[in-house]
Image: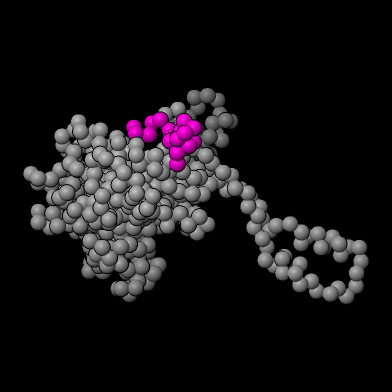
């Protein structure tokens, strides 16, 4: 396979993966229960594409920041609501601003650019944007550097902006107060009467509107600097996974180059509600090493009863199964995204080749971290990865519409789900690739010795066996 989109290459790289997970809970619904879907008339466990994409994106970013892999040292993005706080920390630590003024100024600048913030009266959200913003990781440092460079003008503007906000808030409070008085008066006056309170309410509304209109506009140079800092620029993961920012109309959105499907079990779902009892160390220590009592009476037995039983009990849901998941990389879209972010054609080509290699590595290695300590789920390795090129994406979920029956082959079933799913997937691929001339010969990778032996017995898989994730795009 080639990593370039050229006359000899294909636009789409399709990836398909089978993995067996035992007693895990990588994603939950609002009630803490495993997520599921009904497919082929049977309920299946599901791991959402959102959980998978975040795991892959963070895996790629962490490796790049650590100087590991094909994207070592390249720019990546951060998705957060804390850009005002990040900018303020840069102002305080790198430019010597007083922390309170730094936060106030950073929030005012970013808010005036178009992003809405939380309720100023609630300290926990006052300096957080209402939406998560995916931007290059150095955006806060860039905004802070501009504010410091234009400190005199920005400080003067921020003072005027904050004063106007205070006046606007006071006018709004007056409007609400007048409205309450008007409502109370309306209950006492005959229908249709024009009370004085109505005029007061109208006056308050006009005052609030006037205050809003007096909010000074952010200096054009500063707004341009903020938009440049928040633009995708060279953040490879933004080009890969995309972003949508509706709040600022002139800040570019990015249609991601990666498509991801929800993972689902290839067989009917089976869920275990695991009862657990957590021990109280102090209670058990008292039971093992009781202190001699100075005197004994009947009430001592009541105190001893407090040391009986577990410290805490409860249930947690766990799932087990063999999952199929799929993702596809649009190589042409990736290059267009990088060119739109300002790269030359040569730079975009080089970055795209590196990004493809890291995308495949993340698809194979990354895993959602929910319950990772209590289930060791992140140590899982795929039973099989299938990769191939084509002129369109190919999703092979249909191979598992009929759930795998894990009863023994002699008993009418297909046997264990892992090997049975491998046979189905590769048979499906060989069948489809024989009818779609754009599909190029695939490659398969396994980390399971049993599956490796199985691959040696299969005659027509439509794929060449490789020994590393890097070779999936070679």
Q: Position of residue 75 (x, y in %)?
A: 24, 61
Is 154 part of what is drawn in magenta? no
Identify which residue, 37 or 213, lies in the foreground: 37
Identify which residue, 375 or 149, lies in the foreground: 375
Residues drawn in magenta: 398-416
Residue plotted at (81% across, 59% down) = 305
| Left or right of residue 120, residue 284 in this image | right
Q: Quadrant of residue 86?
A: bottom left
Q: Is residue 196 above or below residue 81?
A: above
Q: Is residue 3 above or below residue 326?
A: below
Q: Position of residue 297 (x, y in %)?
A: 92, 66
- Total labels: the figure holds 0
Residue plotted at (33% across, 62% down) = 62
Q: Magenta segment, principal secondary structure?
A: loop
Is residue 215 visible from the viewing direction of this image? Answer: no
Residue plotted at (72% across, 69% down) = 285
Residue plotted at (12% across, 45% down) = 9
């Amino acid at each position: 396979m080639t990593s370039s989109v050229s006359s000899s290459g294909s636009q789409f790289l399709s990836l398909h993966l089978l993995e067996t997970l035992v007693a895990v809970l990588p994603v939950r619904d609002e009630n803490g229960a495993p997520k599921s879907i009904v497919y082929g008339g049977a309920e299946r466990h599901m791991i959402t594409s959102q959980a998978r994409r975040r795991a892959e994106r963070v895996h790629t970013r962490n490796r790049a920041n650590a100087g590991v892999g094909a994207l070592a040292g390249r720019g990546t993005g951060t998705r957060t609501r804390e850009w005002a706080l990040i900018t303020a920390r840069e102002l305080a630590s790198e430019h010597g601003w007083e922390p309170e003024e730094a936060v106030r100024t950073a929030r005012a600048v970013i808010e005036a650019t178009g992003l809405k913030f939380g309720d100023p009266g609630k300290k926990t959200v006052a300096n957080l944007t209402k939406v998560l913003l995916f931007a290059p990781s150095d955006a806060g440092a860039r905004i802070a550097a501009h504010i410091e460079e234009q400190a005199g003008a920005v400080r003067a503007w921020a003072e005027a902006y904050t004063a106007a906000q205070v006046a606007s808030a006071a006018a709004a409070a007056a409007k609400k107060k007048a409205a309450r008085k008007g409502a109370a008066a309306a209950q006492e006056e005959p229908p249709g009467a024009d009370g004085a309170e109505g005029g007061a309410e109208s006056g308050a509304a006009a005052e609030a509107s006037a205050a809003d209109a007096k909010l000074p506009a952010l200096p054009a140079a500063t707004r341009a600097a903020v938009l440049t800092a928040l633009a995708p620029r060279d953040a490879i993961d933004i080009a890969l996974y995309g972003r949508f920012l509706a709040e600022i109309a002139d800040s570019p959105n990015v249609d991601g180059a990666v498509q991801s499907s929800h993972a689902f079990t290839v067989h009917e779902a089976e869920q275990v509600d695991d009862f657990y009892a957590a021990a109280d160390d102090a209670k058990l220590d008292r039971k093992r090493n009781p202190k001699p009592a100075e005197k004994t009476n009947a009430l001592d037995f009541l105190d001893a009863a407090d040391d009986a039983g577990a410290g805490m009990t409860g249930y947690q849901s766990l799932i087990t199964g063999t999952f199929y998941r799929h993702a596809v990389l649009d190589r042409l879209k990736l290059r267009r995204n990088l060119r739109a972010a300002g790269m030359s054609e040569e730079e975009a080509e080089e970055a795209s080749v590196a990004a493809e290699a890291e995308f495949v590595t993340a698809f194979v290695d990354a895993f959602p971290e929910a319950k990772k300590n209590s289930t060791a789920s992140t140590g899982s390795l795929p039973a099989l990865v299938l990769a191939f090129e084509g002129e369109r994406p190919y999703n092979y979920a249909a191979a598992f519409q009929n759930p795998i029956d894990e009863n023994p082959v002699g008993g009418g079933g297909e046997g264990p789900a892992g090997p049975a799913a491998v046979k189905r997937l590769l048979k499906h691929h060989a069948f489809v690739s024989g009818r779609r001339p754009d599909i190029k010969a695939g490659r398969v990778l396994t980390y399971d010795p049993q599956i490796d032996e199985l691959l040696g017995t299969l005659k027509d898989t439509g794929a060449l066996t490789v020994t590393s994730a890097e070779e999936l795009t070679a």
